[in-house]
Image (cartoon, rainbow, N blue to C red):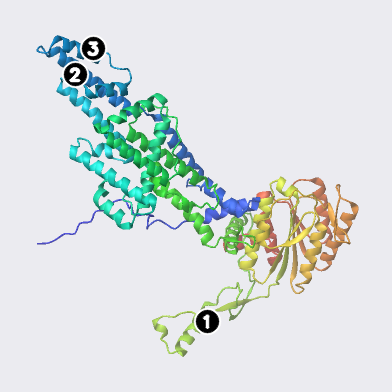
Amino acid sequence: MTLHNRSRYGRYAGGPDPLAPPVDLAEALEAIAEDVMEGYSPRHALQEFLRRGGRNRDGLDNLARRVQQRRSELLGRHKLDGTLNEVRKLLDTAVLEERKQLARDAMMDNNDRAFREMQLQNLPQSTAAAVNELASYDWQSSSAREAYERIKDLLGREVLDQRFAGMKQALENATDKDREAVSEMLRDLNKLLGKHRRGEDTDADFREFMAKHGDYFPENPQSVEELVDALAKRAAAAQRMLQSMSPEQREELMRLSAQAFGSADLMAQLNQLDDSLRALRPGEDWSGSERFGGQEGLGLGDGTGVLQDIAELDELSEQLSQHYNGSTLDDLDLDALARQLGQNAAVTARTLAEIERAMQDGGYLRRGADGDLRLSPQAMRRLGKSLLRDTAKQLSGRQGGRDTRVAGAAGEQTGSSRQWEFGDAEPWDVTRTITNAIRRTMADGGDPGRGLRLAVGDIEVTETEARTQAAVVLLADVSFSMAAEGRWVPMKRTALALHHLVSTRFRGDRLQLITFGRYAQLMDIGELTALPAFREQGTNLHHGLLLAGRFFRQHPSMQPVLLVVTDGEPTAHLLGDGESWFCWPPDPETIRVTVAELDRLGRAGTQATFFRLGDDPGLERFVRRLARRIDGRVVAPDTGDLGAAVVGEYLRAHFRSRYYDDDWAAGI
């Protein structure tokens, strides 16, 4: 006999999809960095991204909107008279069947028949009052008696369903033994909660109770605290449902409740349970109410369930808002979100939480000395790489030929090689590298035929003609006009791309970022990226050139390269006492000292390029004259092309060829 193993497959339901691809942080990092460059804090930028979501992913705002839509849908679909209507229908059925029986019963005494008909005719308009009045009525019709008994059974199941979800269905067609079992459970439950309120209960008490009555609690609580939590949420929702009814409806139901299972003891036990739960969980909303406006009637149990759903939706709304102190997306109740909005919503929220966690735990955001979050060096490197790649695409799209002689960053090959050193960007000499690995393997007693492992000491690179190292200064205008005219973020993106290029492809060069507004100051790339836009007047190019000259003098063996990005004429200069003098229109003295400082840089052999932003005629004339004085260049790029223009000019300073663009871009 051959046994065949059969496997059945279904949707994975055990948590996060183990086959799902890892979270891609590139989009999140770029969006967060863009907001940081706009002037927002990294914490705020992260929150904004999580609220907006990505290109193909909902954010918290959309999830919150769907939560509110779900809440409005529940309130707009239902009304709370379901139980009253069911009771009224059963009462009408009982009265009608009784009248039919009275009309058919020829043996009945006429006086007795007339009295009964009068009693039925004069029943109170109130459903509760009519049901209570018929409590002692001697029914002549068995079908009428059955309909009336169903009223008491329905009320009993409904009031239990308010406190214990599923009781209405579970106790349908219940026997007296079943009802007694429920009463016993209530007595034992009240006893357990009473001991818990006094601090006298033990784990053994809870285990004994669950062993005896656990079938009534599908939530499967693991402790008395979990049991109280589940019961209190349901009981509070039941109370809010009553508060949501009209005063007339509420009074009717309270009076009808006395007929539940025809047992006054049941309501006494439930009232005791409510008292205990209120005392144990006073923080639940016991007094709230909602305005229902639909047409679909709800019974007591179903209405309580809807109120629980609404409470759960309110909690989700609070969690999604992230407005409370210490909030994180790990606070989100994913099970509740799946219940209310579906599994896809829970997957979306889980992904957003993973992004938040990965951005902080993965090293992209770190806390500074002030305790606030900042973009980490790792984040800056990844962002710079992305921006440099975009710049390469812009450069490769320009018109022009290619000259493979200047491909890469090292210049002409000499035919010799040397051992690789950290920072070298020259191509490997593969033949010599493999030869070195074979020799080392054989010297160590190994067999090269069985495979080689390269060591750092094996690597040799091809020697090239000497390339002059450069000391590069990027002077970036940070006057308020840069932000006001939409040039703030492109300026920062340009700085990031250039910084990444120098630090990864031209490690022998030195780059200094200098900003100039009313004053100039040295900045590292992290400071510049997070720099907010100040509403400060002044374009102190003079101070910036002074700092640039100091940097060049610190690197006397390197070629000085000056890149100036500005959108306005100089309107400030540095006085002898270190104060900044501002004047608009530009003061002649400001122009004089600025030009004098530029001339000093020119005499030192500085290669200068001015990037003029905007169409101001005065700026155009001024910058052209500055460039002419030191044999520099003027570039007037569109704002979106600024990064490619600056990087291109930096590369030109090395290769001195108009054909560098495509060659370098092809290597990115």
Disc 3 marks a residue whose amino acid type is: Met
User: Is the C-beta separation of discs 1 and 2 under 8 Å?
Assistant: no
Q: CA distance from mark 1 to mark 2?
A: 104 Å
Direction from residue 612 to residue 136 in the image, left or right: left
Element type at mark 1: helix
Tell me residue 103's x, y (percent).
15, 12
Closer to the eye: label 1 or 3? 3
Give the image location of residue 505, x and y in percent: 62, 67
Please name the residue shown 40% across and 83% down the image. 449
Residue 46 visible? The answer is yes
> Image point 18% across, 37% down: which residue?
176
- Choose the circle earlier in sequence order: 1 or 2: 2
Q: Earlier in the sequence, mark 1 or mark 3?
A: 3
Q: Secondary structure at mark 2?
A: helix
Position in image of residue 622 (x %, y %): 83, 52
Residue with the mark numbered 3: 118
Which label is found at residue 640? none
Q: Which mark is residue 97?
A: 2
Mark number for residue 458? 1
Screen quadrant of the C terminus: bottom right
Say whether residue 178 is left or right of residue 524. Answer: left
Q: Residue at x 55, y 77 (%)?
A: 429
Q: Nearer the viewer, residue 410 or 372?
A: 372
